Image (cartoon, rainbow, N blue to C red):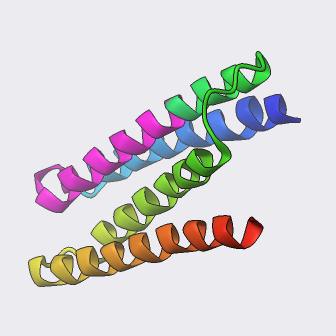
Amino acid sequence: MEKRLWLGITWPSMVLTLIFGLWLGEVNNLWVSPWFHAKLALVFLLVIYHLECGRIYSRFQQNHIHRSSQWLRYWNEVATLLLFAIVFLAILKNTLDLYWGFGVLAGITVLLLGAVYIYKKVRK
């Protein structure tokens, strides 16, 4: 099931998202917008995150687990933060709104890290 999810859903979704995102950038002439460059940088980080998840998946398949469950819980939240930031950049293109967006993103980060920490304490 993991293999089907990884090869049948995750990879095709990433490739199609990149193709259609770049195409929309070209059609709407977004290449001159600074917020679009920032968004592309975050998407690039998300692709790196995706590739690292592939490495972790391969290690799990070989039963070489080097990370703790706590680390994996935090790692799981990285994609959430990147996706929030990407959406905020698309919605909040104004500089003033961008500062509010980063404030909200920082708040969400604190909430997610706190939730993982509380989950660890409750589980013990």
Magenta region, main secondary structure: helix
Q: Position of residue 19 (x, y in %)?
A: 45, 39
Residue at image location 68% in from the left, 21% down from the top: 59
- Residue 44 in magenta? yes
Q: Quadrant of the C terminus?
A: bottom right
Seen in the picture, residue 93 relative to 2 is either above or below; the reply is below
User: Who is closer to the viewer here, 21 or 41?
Assistant: 41
Q: Name the residue furthest front.
A: 124
Q: Quadrant of the N terminus?
A: top right
User: Who is closer to the viewer here, 61 or 22?
Assistant: 61
Residue at image location 14% in from the left, 79% down from the top: 94
Residue 89 horizontal side relative to residue 83, left or right: left
**Magenta residues (range):** 29-51
Q: Position of residue 22 (x, y in %)?
A: 35, 44
Q: Quadrant of residue 123?
A: bottom right
Residue at image location 28% in from the left, 55% down from the top: 39
